[in-house]
Image: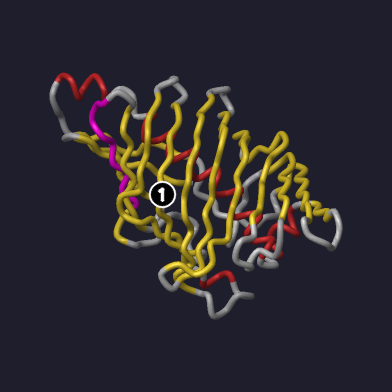
Amino acid sequence: MKLLSYFTLSIATLLLVTTACEKQEAADWTYSTDDTMADLAFDDVYNAMSGESNDNNNLRACANLTLSGTTFPITVTADFNASTGCGDGRVRSGVITAVYSGRWNATGTTVTITTTDYTVNGYKVAGTNVIENLGTVNGNPTFRSTVTNGQVTTPTGDVIHRDAVKEYAWIDGTNTPLDITDDVWQLTGSANGTTRNGNAYTAQITTPVIKANSCNWVQQGVVEVQPAGGGVVRKIDYGPNTCDATATVSYGLWSMNITMN
């Protein structure tokens, strides 16, 4: 998988009018934007190490890599030094460490990923991500990603917390394993966390998310975000499988676009 550049979010449009209760909740869009931001931040880490596992030279071009040996378990350390050479124009610093129990494409292999002072464009990403090769599921090679104690710190010091379990099904490009540009992935799963304002929530992919390596952005899928204790569900719609940077966040009669940069 390639290193993707869809991390920073900006609000583009706010539409419509709704009830007084919904107006009060509308002031806090961070349920949706923070879940999306944290999700894409951890996808970026996953992409980096899965790309290295598939001999993607992008990571090797922008980080100093060291291996603990040639016998599994093998620890791979990627040390970034304000690098911009990953092919997406983003500035990375810090260290990603991945411990491989076996070969990436072998069923049952686990990869345990941690970070040390790792930042992307000033956003600090911390936590543990364990990836397991589940083998072939419904005809597609599938990997499970489990994020625990996830934390994203924004450049202004705001902190977003996240735990998540997602499955990545490799639905296209499997016949050309050395060419990652034609790979397409389908994601399902759920998450929970707290926004930068300290508000707890849960999130569920209700329509599978589609990511093609040929596109820098998520192309399709729907995620529903539920504030803890009830409240109106926020819906994040990534669109009709088109390669563009726009997603739509809506709930009730309110709607706005966010731009994935």
Q: Which residue lies furthest to the front in this view?
A: 108
Q: Residue at x 78, y 59 (%)?
A: 72
Disc 1, SS = strand
Residue numbers of the magenta segment: 230-238
Side of 81 relative to 192 (left or right): right
Q: Residue furthest bottom?
A: 175
Asked if residue 253 lies in the magenta stretch, the reply is no
Q: Residue furthest right?
A: 69
Q: Residue furthest left?
A: 19
Side of 27 relative to 79 (left or right): left
Q: Name the residue under label 1.
A: 189
Q: Which colour scheme is used?
A: secondary structure
Q: Which residue is drawn at 53% across and 23% down?
A: 158
The image quarter containing residue 33 is: top left
- The relative height of residue 89 versus residue 226 in the rendered view (above or below) is below
- The residue nearer to you, when weighing 233 against 242, is 233
Characterize the local packing of mark 1: few (<14), some (14-19) or many (20 or more) Cα atoms within 10 angstroms.
many
Instruction: Tell me which amino acid carries mark 1.
Output: Gly
